[in-house]
Amino acid sequence: MLEVLQEAVKAIKEGKNFAFATIITSKGSAPRHENSKMIIFEDGTFKGTIGGGLFEKQVIEKAIELIKKGNQW
């Protein structure tokens, strides 16, 4: 998690847009659990993981879409 937060600080200093993805809750057998985080950049690069696979791919695609639209939550 520290690596993800350090990347966020660096991105803010460099004026880069990014999104965070965080696992809020999980049930049963899952590759990652609560508080797993990743930071996603507009170019598709990222640090951290929320579990990999198709789910993570979909999260990255949605994050890029939101960054490009300028959405902020």
Image (spheres, rainbow, N blue to C red):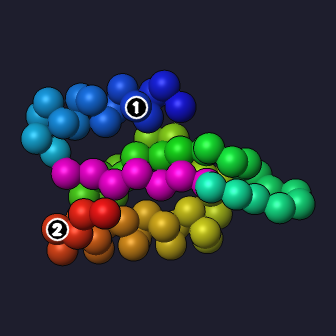
Residue 70: mark: 2
Instruction: Give the side of residue 63 with respect to residue 72, left or right.
Output: right
- Mark 2 residue crowding within 10 angstroms, few (<14) / some (14–19) / many (20+): few
Residue 12 coordinates in the image, percent (x, y): 18, 36
10 is higher (above) or lower (below) than 66: above
| Marked residue nearer the N-terminal end (2 or 1) | 1
Give the extent of the magenta segment: 17-23
48 is higher (above) or lower (below) than 5: below
Instruction: Identify the residue at horizontal 29%, vertical 73% (top origin).
Output: 65
Q: Quadrant of residue 14?
A: top left
Amino acid on which disc 2 is placed: Gly
- Mark 1 residue crowding within 10 angstroms, few (<14) / some (14–19) / many (20+): some
Instruction: Specify whether residue 28 is painted magenta.
Output: no
Residue 5: mark: 1
Amino acid on which disc 1 is placed: Leu
Instruction: Specify whether residue 22 is painted magenta.
Output: yes
Residue 55 coordinates in the image, percent (x, y): 61, 69
How many callouts does the rendering have?
Answer: 2
Instruction: Give the side of residue 23 with respect to residue 28, left or right.
Output: left
Q: Indicate the quadrant containing the C terminus: top left, top right, bottom left or bottom right.
A: bottom left
Instruction: Identify the residue at horizontal 39%, vertical 73% (top origin).
Output: 62
Kindly tell me whether residue 43 is visible in this rendering: no
Residue 72 coordinates in the image, percent (x, y): 24, 63
Instruction: Identify the residue at horizontal 16%, vertical 68% (top origin).
Output: 70
